[in-house]
Amino acid sequence: MSTKGNDRGLAVVTGAGQGLGAAIALELACEGFAVLLVARSADALDQARAQAAAANGGKAFMLALDLLAPDAMARIREAVADTGMPLTCLVNNAGQGLYGRFADLPIAEQHRMMRLNMDVPVMLTHALLPLLRQAPRAWLLNISSMTAYGSIATLAAYGGSKAFVLRWSRALGVELKGTGVRVTCACPGSITTGFTARAGMQAMDDLAKKFGTGPEPVAKTCVRAMLKGRAEVVPGLLNRITAFFQQVLPAGPVERVGSGIYLKRLG
């Protein structure tokens, strides 16, 4: 049970059925937020909701839906209203990855990924921002990726979509300065959540296991940075060092080395 009290309002977390999203929902519950978990799988959501409810005294709700459905944003707004709680936090975590050469991947799958990674957070933020701005203090946490800092072959569309999230978040943070809504963009590295399998990146499994981090410490770092009002966070010391050099060294050589590693694994 949380010792911090349920006094922070309601947090909406997308992609909350498993992995980082479920871990963030639990961490927010421990920080005193009521939580509304959103994802496609009702079974996975129910388990994650139960864990969050045990941490915050039962103030955990769930909504099973496809975020790409035409009425998804309206249904989320309705679910928020049904809780009767003020909305104070939105976590745009839902996303998808695809691994492979751009020309070899089905364009329909790439388009779906781009919609989920870019359109959904933009549309949901636009739909819920008026509610967030009603609170004296509110938070927006967008989950990007370290791939946002460099262009990597085999992750062309995925990395591009995550770069959009990073730059959109930076601009949005400037626009919302002084409104009470603080914007944080998190750029995690590899997380051991089964993401590589879902993205078709089995060739990278050994590296993911060697250098990856469990979702719980990443969630703690993300939520802590959000509550401190940090504009950007890269969880993990090694990841922070890597991201630093990606930004200060010439892009061409860095991206050729990174792309070479991924292309070699792809075969």
Image (cartoon, helix red, strand yellow):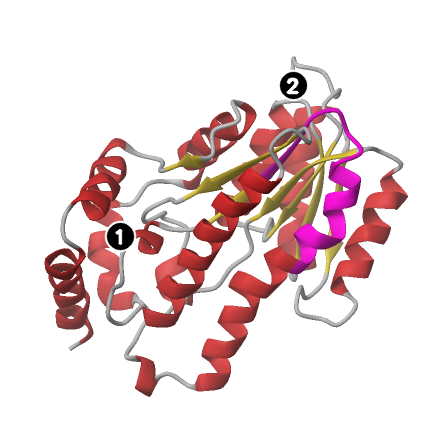
Viewer-nearest residue: 230 or 206: 230
Q: Which residues are magenta?
A: 123-140
Residue at (49%, 47%) from the top-left corner? Answer: 143
Viewer-nearest residue: 153 or 236: 153
User: Where is residue 107 shown, x and y percent of the image?
Assistant: 45, 85
Local packing at callout 1 (Cα closer than 10 Å; few below 14, some 14-19, many 20+) is: many
Residue at (33%, 41%) from the top-left corner? Answer: 213
What residue type is disc 1 on?
Ala
Is residue 202 found left or right of 134 in the rendered image? left
User: Where is residue 64 shown, x and y percent of the image?
Assistant: 72, 58
Viewer-nearest residue: 81 or 169: 169
Question: Is residue 135 one of those drawn in magenta?
Answer: yes
The numbered mark at residue 208 is 1
What residue type is disc 2 on?
Ser
Is residue 147 found left or right of 246 in the rendered image? right
Occupied quadrant, residue 159: bottom left
Occupied quadrant, residue 174: top right
The numbered mark at residue 2 is 2
Question: Is residue 67 one of those drawn in magenta?
Answer: no
Viewer-nearest residue: 136 or 21: 136
| Vertical arrangement, residue 61 with respect to residue 3, above or below | below
Residue at (65%, 13%) from the top-left corner? Answer: 3
